Amino acid sequence: MKFFVDTAQPDDIRALNGYGLLDGVTTNPSLIAKAGRDFKDVVAEICAMIDGPVSAEVAATDSAGMIAEGEHLSRIADNVVIKLPTTLDGLAACRHFSAKGIRTNLTLCFSANQALLVAKAGATYVSPFVGRLDDINLDGMALIRDIRTIYDRFAFPTQILAASLRTANHVTGAALAGADVATVPPAVILGLIRHPLTDSGLATFTKDWAATGQSIL
């Protein structure tokens, strides 16, 4: 499974990329607002930082506006992916970009039927929101499994980009459910490596090694 980081903070992206943990980046209007900088400048900086796809979301809600904004965003860098809402207008814009070979990410997907239409529109990625479904007592991981079954049955190439993942357990669940990509906040990615038994075991090894008085170098 690929890992995208869900942030618009270049410092966080730079640090994670330095560990070799990133395959891409997703942003959204809320994350850009938190960054407090010009949207296009942030996207350009992120795109120059990594080789993988960088999702940049349109602000328009009508297909003509989405297409105009998406065309503009696509010229920022070759690795920009146009992020569109899962609406009828979003699907129309998606078909436009798909026909031109421009990658798309259809966001705010909450049902298998929506995901089916997204795939038929030729999207590169579909972003089902796991955590937000959990918030209203629905099973977000069940949606990932349903989409996986549909896409495999009909050989759709659209990749499942599990979004709204908030915990390490969410990441594990998305991997087991068959998501192609998980996009998570920086803190969640860093938390995946942590385990108390790893920490205590390393502390013991370090103490025992120091007692030998030896040096490898």
Image (cartoon, rainbow, N blue to C red):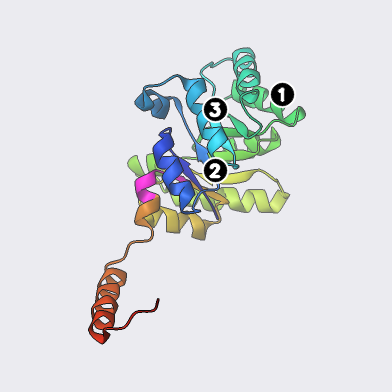
Residue 96: image tag? 1
Q: Residue at x 56, y 42 (%)?
A: 112
Residue nearest the viewer, comparing 203 with 190: 203
Residue nearest the viewer, comparing 62 with 133: 62
Residue 166 shows up from this direction: no
Helix, strand or loop status at disc 1: helix
Q: Is residue 207 above or below residue 199?
A: below
Q: Position of residue 101 (x, y in %)?
A: 74, 32
> Quadrant of the rendered structure where residue 60 is?
top right
Q: Residue at x 39, y 39 (%)?
A: 132
Measure the C-alpha gap from mark 1 to mark 3: 23 Å
Q: Report the label total.
A: 3
Q: Which tag, 3 or 2, sits closer to the chain's start? A: 2
* Magenta segment boundaries in residue numbering: 183-188
Q: Which tag, 2 or 1, sits closer to the chain's start? A: 2
Of the residues tagged 2 and 1, which is closer to the observer? 2
Q: Amino acid at mark 3?
A: Ala
Residue nearest the viewer, comparing 25 with 160: 25
Is residue 187 covered in magenta? yes
Residue labelled with disc 3 = 44
Q: Amino acid at mark 1?
A: His
> Quadrant of the rendered structure where residue 91 is?
top right
Residue 168 shows up from this direction: yes
Measure the C-alpha gap from mark 2 to mark 1: 23 Å
